[in-house]
Amino acid sequence: MKNLSSPFGRPQLLGNISRQFDLAVQTGDTGRVKRPVQAAFRPAYRREVENWLLAPGESVKTDKELVLHYLVELRDLSYDDQPQMCVADVLKDRRAAAMIAAVFLQNLVE
């Protein structure tokens, strides 16, 4: 990830942050299955994310909204061709949304 100077005094973040992890997703009414995935996120400073999440006068943001705002793509690594997953379908599962959000939050730039 490269940094360029921004007019606001902080370096501008370039390049996506890519992380691989096992994502447990809902399968039917009772089952969950772990799938190896690769998520690509837009890089962000911790302060930027805190300001977005806690913007005064706005409703509380959910994990789903956080993921939709910062996730670039999600790929299923359990297949040879590593197809993109339908993020809207994955985010119907609140636990999966929370898991993706947690991975993103672990990779914020100080």
Image (spheres, grey):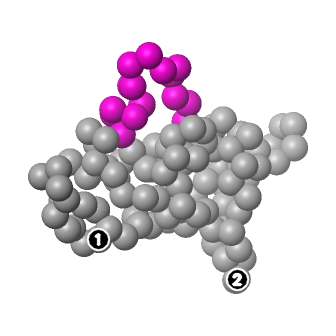
Q: Is residue 16 magenta?
A: no
| Residue 61 place in picture, x, y as percent | 52, 28
Residue located 57% across and 38% down the image: 65
Disc 2 marks which residue?
Answer: 81
Closer to us: 16 or 99: 16
Residue 2 image-quadrant placement: bottom left
Residue located 40% across and 64% down the image: 17
Label 2 sits on a secondary structure element that is: loop
| Residue 28 place in picture, x, y as percent | 87, 43
Tell me which amino acid carries mark 1.
Answer: Met
Q: CA distance from mark 1 to mark 2?
A: 25 Å
Residue extending furthest toward the front: 7
Closer to us: 48 or 40: 48
Disc 1 marks which residue?
Answer: 1
Chief secondary structure of the magenta portion: loop
For the magenta stretch, what is the residue range? 49-63
* N-terminal label among 1 and 2: 1
Label 2 crowd bin: few (<14), some (14–19), many (20+), radius 10 Å: few
Which quadrant would the N terminus be assigned to in this image? Answer: bottom left
Instruction: Mark 1 and mark 2 in contact? Answer it, CB < 8 Å.
Output: no
Residue 83 image-quadrant placement: bottom right
Closer to us: 80 or 59: 59
90 left or right, relative to 104: right
Q: Is residue 27 visible?
A: yes
97 left or right, relative to 48: right
| Residue 30 place in picture, x, y as percent | 84, 37
Residue extending furthest toward the bottom: 80
Q: Is residue 99 visible?
A: no
15 left or right, relative to 10: right
Q: Is residue 50 magenta?
A: yes
Residue located 36% across and 48% down the image: 106
